[in-house]
Amino acid sequence: MGDKTPDLRKLFIDAAGHAAAYRESLSERRVRAPKPVGEVRADFHRPFGDAPRPADEVIEELVSVADGGLVATAGPRYFGFVVGGALPAATAADILAAGWDQNAFNSVLSPAAAAAEEAAGTWLKELLGIPPTASVGFVTGAQAANTVGLATARNHVLLQAGWDVETDGLTGAPKVRILAGEERHATIDRSLRLLGFGSANLELVRSAPNGAVDLADLRARLVDHVGPLIVCLQAGNVNTGAIDPLGEACELIHEYGGWAHVDGAFGIWASASPTLRDQVTGVELADSWGCDGHKWLNLPYDSGFVFTAHPDSHARATSYSASYLITSGAPEPGDFTLESSRRARGLAVWAGLQELGRDGVREIIDRCCHLARRFAVQLAEAGYEIANEVNLNQVLVSFGTDQETDRVIAATQQAGVCWLAGTTWNDRHYVRISVSNHLTTESDVDRSVAALLAAAQTT
């Protein structure tokens, strides 16, 4: 370190001031990053010096070089992926978490971090309609949630078949049959690869026209099934927002002794809205659930949750012990995740939920769905095809040919008023609009529609 000890109060306040100034600029900031990625790389890649530097100088330089590469994903007109903008209290709690520098592995390392996760986990289960006895793991996002949920599923169904994965591994284990919908999210495939199943062993169930799993096809595939079984369901198709028939599917899976895992990255939040809850009827019947906090709940990155209806199986799949590790003797937060050294992300979850309350969560979900329908209505009235039933916050729109749709996407991104991404669905190209931010207003939608129409009308 340098000769001078940094003034921590001034350093932290200045850093928070830069962050606040950025967030205050979001409503009018150009959404696309100001500089191309090559220039941003050049700004960051400077010689690595030998001598220490003052901390305040380093932070000022970081702010300067990063600004050109910041995408306004936290702002009200970013619709490219299903991401939210972090809530004020949650962001402030994350700043505190970094300052407090707590390790959330267990309650001995940080009683506060552990207690925050325990309390917030209870509230999350209430909001999502998940049984209160379910275990909760605070993970990095839906990818980690799916991996932990499916690791628990793997070990549970094999133990039922007389095989102990924790002791004997997978070599020689009975074959596990794994099914998922044709339109599952790609993180399911990645989790299965990481867990040693291999992509070739995934059996695909036909999807209905809206992207949800076809229950009749699932039923037909399970006739006469015997043996270990895992079925991956989905709450919130990444293109259409469609939700699988969760209750009926879970009952069917359980008839054959299987494990039902729900990838609810964003769609499971329909549970928090009385007007949307019927779309996730029966969600409580599943065996495991995964979802994100940094999507529709508008928490800071990174924030995700895994829940299982079988806490003992969950802990057996992911926990460990060592002679030097001191614990409280009770189940610990680190028992339900894949990380040992864990930042205290539960503090931001606790603060965000307290800031919103049940009514605030409901209002975000309902308003985003209302704004998605506003997008669809205006674009349809302008003569463009809306490809999906807008049941949640996802809108697919075509501007004619694939080439024209791609051109409109590129032109809109370049203009910078809003940012929308493209997707391919049923072999056609669409603009995919995801409305997930608590800051987005009707005015933001109207400005974004105007930007899309201007791009479409420019030849």
Image: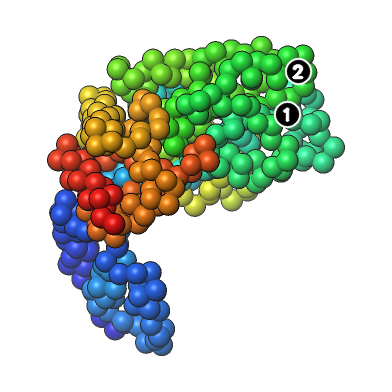
Measured as percent of width and height from the top left, residue 206 is found at: 61, 26
| Residue in view at x 59 percent, y 33 percent | 182
| Residue in view at x 79 percent, y 25 percent | 162
Query: Which residue is the site of mark 1?
Result: 177
Please report whichever mark, 1 or 2, sits nearer to the chain's N-terminal start. Answer: 1
Residue closest to the far right: 172
Q: Judge left or right: residue 41 versus residue 17.
A: right
The answer to whether any part of residue 291 appears in the image is: no
Asked if labels 2 and 1 touch by Cβ distance under 8 angstroms, the answer is yes
Residue 225: assigned label: 2
Considering the numbered disc 2 on the image, is that residue within a helix, a strand or a loop?
loop
Q: Is residue 311 above or below residue 342?
A: above
Q: CA distance from mark 1 to mark 2?
A: 9 Å
Q: Is residue 44 above or below residue 238?
A: below
Q: Nearer the viewer, residue 346 or 91?
A: 91
User: Which coloring applies here?
Assistant: rainbow
Q: Judge left or right: residue 256 versus residue 250.
A: right
| Residue in view at x 23 percent, y 43 percent | 449
Measured as percent of width and height from the top left, residue 137 is found at: 48, 36
